Amino acid sequence: MYKTIHQYYVYILSNKKNGTLYIGISNNLERRIFEHKYKLVEGFSKKYNLTKLVYFEIFQFVDEAIAREKKLKKWKRQWKINLIEEKNPDWNDLALDWSIDMDSATSAE
């Protein structure tokens, strides 16, 4: 029997180094980042211009991703900054070089 492997992403967006932080979850990171960058969804990230992907983690099971997102949201700000800087000390936009194809970015989840 064929079993599909799913991937879920917990990610952190910012507007600049040590700026405002947004933590989210998605099963299609490229599509979700596209939505943030082009401000296609109303809300916190659009209001504060949070378009830089500064950190993400990959999970196979959605319940693990949801638990991680909830845990990170409860963390102190400095812990989140430390997590980002462990992997991305310059707060580079990890999606900057992504050439997101509009068709694949908006395809069914």
Image (spheres, rainbow, N blue to C red):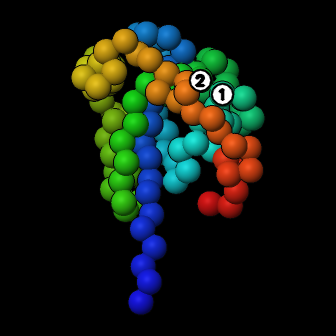
The amino acid type of the residue labelled 2 equals: Thr
The percent coordinates of residue 67 (x first, y second) are 34, 51
Q: Which quadrant of the figure contains the C terminus?
A: bottom right
Who's the residue at 49% across and 21% down the image?
Answer: 93
Tags 1 and 2 touching, CB below 8 Å: yes
Who's the residue at 56% across and 50% down the image?
Answer: 28
Decide if residue 105 is on the left or right side of residue 15.
right
Decide if residue 82 is on the left or right side of residue 30.
left
Q: Distance between the residues labelled 1 and 2?
A: 5 Å
Who's the residue at 58% across and 21% down the image?
Answer: 50
Above or below, 65 against 14 in this view is below
The percent coordinates of residue 22 (x first, y second) are 49, 28
Q: Look at the numbered disc 1 and give the secondary structure of its residue.
A: helix
Residue pointed to by mark 1: 37
Query: In the picture, residue 55 is in which quadrant?
Result: top left
The amino acid type of the residue labelled 1 equals: Lys
Residue pointed to by mark 2: 51
The foreground one among 65 and 85 is: 85
Q: Which mark is residue 91?
A: none
Q: Hey, which residue is sitting farthest bottom in the picture?
A: 1
Above or below, 79 against 71 in this view is above
The percent coordinates of residue 20 (x first, y second) are 49, 16
Above or below, 40 against 59 in this view is above
Who's the residue at 44% across and 83% down the image?
Answer: 2
Examine the rendering and report whether any part of residue 22 can be seen. Answer: no
Nearer-N-terminus badge (1/2): 1
Above or below, 86 against 17 in this view is below
